[in-house]
Amino acid sequence: MKPNWNTNQSLALGSSRNNPGATHSRRSKWLGLVAAAVSLTAAPAMAATWVGYMNVFNTAAGTKGGYVFGSAWGVADLKTTVSVLGSGMDQLILQPNYNTYADNAGDAFWRNNDGAGPDGNKWMEANTYVETASIAVSTFSFSGIVGSFTLNSNYVAEAFIKVLDPNSGYATVLNDRVALPASGAFEIHSDLANYQGMILQTGFTIEGLNANPDAEASLGNVTVTVVPEPSAALLGVLGLAGILRRRRN
């Protein structure tokens, strides 16, 4: 599932007409710089970019009710676990939210039955995503592989590509979504031509009641591996390689 970076077809390495030996040396050094650029781009640093945001809703007979508030949350608090696999790929374990129930004993806002429980009292929309501050591509694909899906059927797990317009109060102007499958691959492909300069978010949502930690084993989770978009990775590599080449010249 690694990106197919064929630099030999994309980069002009110069002519060997006058000095084949010198050209071979230059070519070797140039390919070394490209290899360094690829190594930097593919380094397992993607996990540091994942961020969290929680939207909280009231419940209506155990379903999603009216919006209450939204705020940035720590990824671990959502509850999402991120592991770096390397080659630009990350593994995420997506679960229902537990800390709002666990940390608020007797609080009727977060627990049902006037705070006694045993269930949660708020509908949680936990978003784990990577954000790009300014869109500069015309299309984008977000894909991955679901390795395990044991999530309770009362919860919804989706992947998304969103666009927010900072000039319109950060309104969501694109919201392409797909339900995560029980296993196997998923992909979202979005046309971003009309959203240049806006904010891009790509990631996952888990929706459902905030949960009692005592039920964690029975409520399950979704394990998904995120595959980087080859075109985006290649553009980054070629751009860095071009800078290195200009500096050498």
Image (cartoon, rainbow, N blue to C red):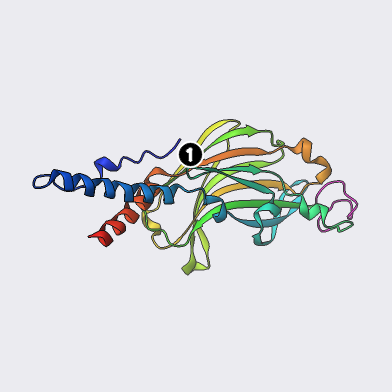
Kindly give the residue lying farthest to the top in the view shown.
Answer: 183
How many marks are shown on the rendered structure? 1
Residue 96 falls left or right of residue 179:
right
Residue 132 falls left or right of residue 4:
right
Packing grade of label 1 (10 A; few <14, some 14-19, many >=20) is some
**Nearest to the observer: residue 186 or residue 17:** 17
- The rendered magenta stretch, by its main secondary structure, is classed as loop
**Quadrant in the picture for the N terminus:** top left
Which residue position is annotated with label 1? Answer: 187
Kindly give the residue lying farthest to the left in the view shown.
Answer: 18
Amino acid beneath label 1: Glu
Residue drawn 37% across the image and 51% down it: 37
Read off the magenta span.
109-120
**Quadrant in the picture for the C terminus:** bottom left
Q: Which x, y percent locates residue 137?
A: 37, 54
Quarter location, residue 145: top right
**Nearest to the observer: residue 169 or residue 63:** 169
